[in-house]
Image (cartoon, coloured by chain):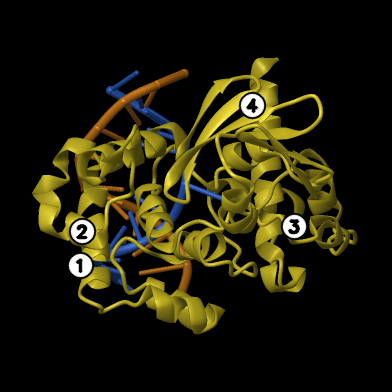
Chain colours: A yellow, B blue, C orange
Amino acid sequence: MKLTKMSNDILLTECSNFDPFISCECGQCFRFEQINENKYILYACGRALTICKDKSGWLFCDITEEEFTTLFVPYFDLERDYSQIICSFSNDESISRAAVAGGGIRIFRQDPWETLISFIISANNNIPRIKKIIDSLCRLLGEERNGFYSFPTPESIKSAGIEGLAPIKAGFRAKYIYDAACKIANGEISLEYIQNCGYAQALDELKKIKGVGDKVANCVLLFGFGYYEAFPIDVWVKRVIAKYYGDGFDPTALGKYAGIAQQYLFYYERSILSKEAEE
DNA sequence: GCCCAGGGAATCG
DNA sequence: CGATTCCATGGG
């Protein structure tokens, strides 16, 4: 990994297994927009970050090297050796095949609270609409700072109430968002405890929140807390398992980075389906 | 009108 | 336990 200062921008080169565009599109995060083929804006770490695909590498606009290093190197998980992780799946044919297509995916280390609400919203929903609801939520209750809306705090959602959430049109999920906000705001659930108590305990803790079951909890643990052994099973991954593994599939057999394998499978299964739709 | 979407709660037996 | 049903909303 090499960072080069280019006036107000940072150029990233010599960084294998990293494609920020694919990493955005692979379903782990929802606050980003594609401007064109070579340009995305990502809303993370409390700011908007413009990312351009350059001939020589990835260009991150209007950011200092210090800010990129302290905020976005951890966020993009750039210090981890993903090629070694992919190697650890080499005895699994379908994961290895999926990792060819999704080799640029990094698991983003997202804000736990934002990830919790985002995946509560994801229940029985599709990605474009999840993005729209989250964006509405930030515009409704977040704080604006030169065009960027922060993610609303638990307290602000709590004081808005279920009726106050009506404009974002989250449907039946509004009461779950509210329940999560209350339990975090009043300390009934501690995100810090979930961060430190280990995977199994953290899973139980998250599931105390209404609207959080096995799938949502595992997404939050994987994308918001860095529990890489979390293996969320949604409708797509269910299809993959039925197709390639059948009964008796055990994600723990994939080791401590099972969640990364899951993300390759999810991305691959969806991308081959959209490719088939084009034909 | 139908079905589906990164599911989960409530309610059965 | 497992199997159904319902939940709001929008796009295809």
Q: Is residue A30 visible?
A: no
Using the image, tell me which numbered label, if any, was put on residue A274: 4
Above or below, A208 against A238 in this view is below
Q: Are marks 4 and 2 on the same chain?
A: yes
Report if the CB atoms under discs 3 and 2 are less than 8 Å apart: no
Name which residue type carries label 1: Cys
Name which residue type carries label 4: Ser
The chain that hosts pointer 2 is: A
Q: Residues within 10 Å of mark 4 (few under 14, many from 20)?
A: few
Res. A112 image quadrant: bottom left
Using the image, tell me which numbered label, if any, was put on residue A245: 3
Instruction: Determine the CA span between mark 2 and mark 1.
Output: 6 Å
Report if the CB atoms under discs 2 and 1 are less than 8 Å apart: yes
Residue at x 43%, y 37% (from the top left corner): A126
Using the image, tell me which numbered label, if any, was put on residue A182: 1
Which percent across, then down, holds residue A111?
45, 58
Residue at x 31%, y 69% (from the top left corner): A209
Q: Are marks 4 and 1 on the same chain?
A: yes
Above or below, A84 against B3 in this view is below
Q: Residue under circle 2?
A: A178
